[in-house]
Structure formats: structure tokens, C-alpha cells
Image (cartoon, rainbow, N blue to C red):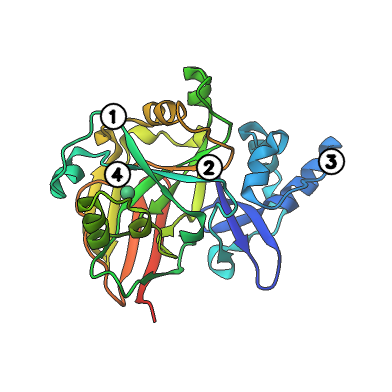
């Protein structure tokens, strides 16, 4: 199943199930399902609340409600505003240098254990929104990545099996980076927080594909700028795979439901300029497209 967070003009935020170019509203589907099976109505609207309400969001129930799709009037993809899949999550953690080829292109060695940094929720924007280039950076790069959405709490006591079952789904992210600032801060031994977290530096979406419908181990990631290919990689070249990353990080930091993990970018990062259109495409999920403008 593919899920999308969206809005009709002047209406509240909604969640939909996606098939082809159509969006089937979850509230409408669950209304029919509730009547048929005599269950309470779907009580939530945000994705994070939806994940926490596992009696509704489990994969089997989603399959069940989708059987009512022929009784629901779907929306076309282009008649709604797409929202970021995640908006109130507690944290976004991002793994650095998880493809040896990308580590090399920036003159770094492949790490012997995963390392990670934070992206802030204030930097998140949706599909088709605009990335603003800050005036105090001369080089802002795209970094196309696979993102993991956490569906169950994980901490240092979690077993390997709990780690494997904690993934709700996957989406696409562009880990936009002020490369010159990242480099100069690193050289001074300072943290990268600013270089990674300007407003609009975390395009996310457009859909979440549920974990039962996506195998993350051998997927092509492509980034194009103005339709010219810049990055091309495959998740089979991860230095640390997703279960290792979740297991390692949850030894230090508790993952909450709705948290997001960015899994690192392949080689080919390149600078963005005013007027560009940047797209990150992941096989089996879709394409995340954003416009680029100089901030005023
Ligand atoms: Zn990155």
C-alpha cells in the first residue's frame, strides 16, 4: 500500500491510499469499513497518530479497507495539495557516508561504524514545494536518499526481531546540504547543524510505501537536476544496511513512532542553483520533485 498525506483547498489534512494516479480517502474508506464490521470510526488525521493507532494502521486492516475503494470517489493526484508525510514527528536522524563511493568523492574514508546527525522537523517541506538557497552559502547540494519511517518504539532493550518489525514504511528524502558551510564547520571541529537544517532543506515524500510492500535491499536511487542525471546509486551498496543502522542507533537513542531515519546518499552530489528543478526517484516508491530558488 502507498499512503499520502494531503489537503483539498481550505479543508483539513487527510490521509489517502494511492493507486495509480488516484487517491482514496482513508476516512471515507474507514467509514464504510466501520459500518460493515461494526467498528468505531477512524479517529485521527495526522500520519503519526495514525501509526500509533495500530488497530487501524496495521497492514492487514489497510488491505481490508482498500476493498471498499470501488464505493469511494477518488481524487486525482493533481487536484490535491500534497503535504509532507511527517509533520509532528519527534526526530529525524540522518546517517552520513553510508555509500563508500560518496565518502570517497568528498575525500572521506568509509566509516568503521555508522555515524549520524539530526535534521530538524522545521526543515521539512512537501513534494512540489520550494527549496530556498540561503544567501550565506555559495554551494548547496542535493543528496537523494531512502528514508525509513518508524512504526514501533525501539530502544536499547529491543531485540533483533523487534528491530526488524519496527519499520512502518519507506519514503524519499532530499537531504539538502550547504556543502561549503559543512566543510568549514568540520575543519574547525564545529557541528554541522546549520549546514543541514536551513528552512526547506528536508524535502520528504510524496508517499509512504508500507514495509509489507517494499524490499529495500536492491533499489535504484536517481537524482536529476533539470532532467539531467546527477546521482545514480543502488541501496545494495549501503555500507551498513537498515537493520544494522536501527539496531546501532537504538542502543543510544530511543526511536518513537513516526520518527524518520535517512540512510545516506550515493555518489554524484552536485550544487543547486536558482531556477533548478530537482527530482529524487526511488524504484518502487516514486519521485520527489522540488523547485529551487534563491532566498530573498
Ligand atoms: Zn545525507
Q: Which residue is mark 2?
A: 259
How far apart are the alpha carbons under marks 3 and 1?
46 Å
Give the crowd class for mark 3: few <14, some 14-19, many >=20 residues within 10 Å.
Answer: few
Front residue (pair 179, 189): 189
Q: Which disc is residue 113 wearing?
A: 1
Among numbered discs 4 and 2, the one appearing first in the sequence: 4
Q: Distance from label 1 to label 2 (Cα)? A: 21 Å
Residue 177 is left or right of residue 167, and the answer is left
- The response on whether ligand 1 sits within 8 Å of label 3 is no
Give the residue at mark 4: 220
- From the image, state whether disc 1 or disc 2 is nearer to you: 1
In which quadrant of the rendered image does the C terminus lie? bottom left
Counting residues from the N terminus, which is met first, the one under dot 1 or under dot 2?
1
Q: CA distance from mark 4 to mark 2?
A: 24 Å
| Cβ at disc 2 under 8 Å from ligand 1 | no
Residue 161: percent from left, percent from top: 50, 18
Give the distance between the C-alpha atoms of the residues marked 1 and 4, in whole angstroms: 24 Å
Residue at 42% over, 57% down: 202
Residue where numbered disc 3 is placed: 40
Labels 1 and 4: the sequence-earlier one: 1
Give the mark, 2 or 3, whose residue is nearer the N terminus. Answer: 3
Total marks shown come to: 4
Front in this rendered view, residue 74 or 273: 273
The nearer-to-camera label among 1 and 4 is 1
Amino acid at each position: 500500500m502507498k499512503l499520502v498525506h494531503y489537503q483539498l483547498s481550505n479543508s483539513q489534512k487527510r490521509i489517502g491510499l494511492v493507486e495509480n494516479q488516484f487517491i482514496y480517502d482513508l476516512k471515507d474508506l474507514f467509514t464504510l469499513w466501520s459500518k460493515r464490521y461494526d467498528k468505531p470510526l477512524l479517529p485521527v488525521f495526522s500520519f503519526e497518530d495514525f501509526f500509533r493507532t495500530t488497530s487501524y494502521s496495521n497492514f492487514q486492516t489497510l488491505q481490508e479497507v482498500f476493498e471498499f475503494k470501488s464505493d469511494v470517489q477518488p481524487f486525482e493526484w493533481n487536484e490535491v495539495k500534497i503535504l509532507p508525510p511527517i509533520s509532528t514527528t519527534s526526530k529525524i536522524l540522518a546517517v552520513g557516508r553510508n555509500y563508500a563511493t560518496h565518502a570517497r568523492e568528498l575525500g572521506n574514508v568509509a566509516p568503521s561504524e555508522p555515524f549520524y546527525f539530526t535534521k530538524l522537523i522545521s526543515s521539512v517541506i512537501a513534494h512540489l514545494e520550494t527549496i530556498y538557497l540561503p544567501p550565506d552559502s555559495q554551494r548547496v547540494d542535493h543528496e537523494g536518499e531512502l528514508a525509513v519511517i518508524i512504526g514501533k518504539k525501539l530502544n536499547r532493550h529491543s531485540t533483533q526481531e523487534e528491530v526488524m518489525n519496527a519499520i512502518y514504511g519507506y519514503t524519499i528524502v532530499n537531504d539538502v546540504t550547504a556543502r561549503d558551510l559543512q566543510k568549514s564547520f568540520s575543519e574547525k571541529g564545529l557541528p554541522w547543524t546549520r549546514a543541514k537544517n536551513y528552512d526547506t532543506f528536508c524535502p520528504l515524500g510524496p508517499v509512504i510505501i508500507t514495509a509489507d510492500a517494499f524490499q529495500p535491499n536492491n533499489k535504484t536511487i536517481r537524482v536529476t537536476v533539470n532532467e539531467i542525471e546527477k546521482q545514480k546509486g543502488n541501496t545494495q551498496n549501503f555500507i551498513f544496511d537498515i537493520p544494522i543502522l536501527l539496531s546501532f542507533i537504538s542502543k543510544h537513542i530511543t526511536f518513537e513512532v513516526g520518527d524518520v531515519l535517512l540512510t545516506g546518499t550515493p555518489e554524484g552530489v552536485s550544487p543547486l542553483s536558482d531556477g533548478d528543478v530537482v527530482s529524487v526517484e526511488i524504484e518502487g516508491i516514486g519521485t520527489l520533485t522540488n523547485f529551487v530558488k534563491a532566498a530573498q
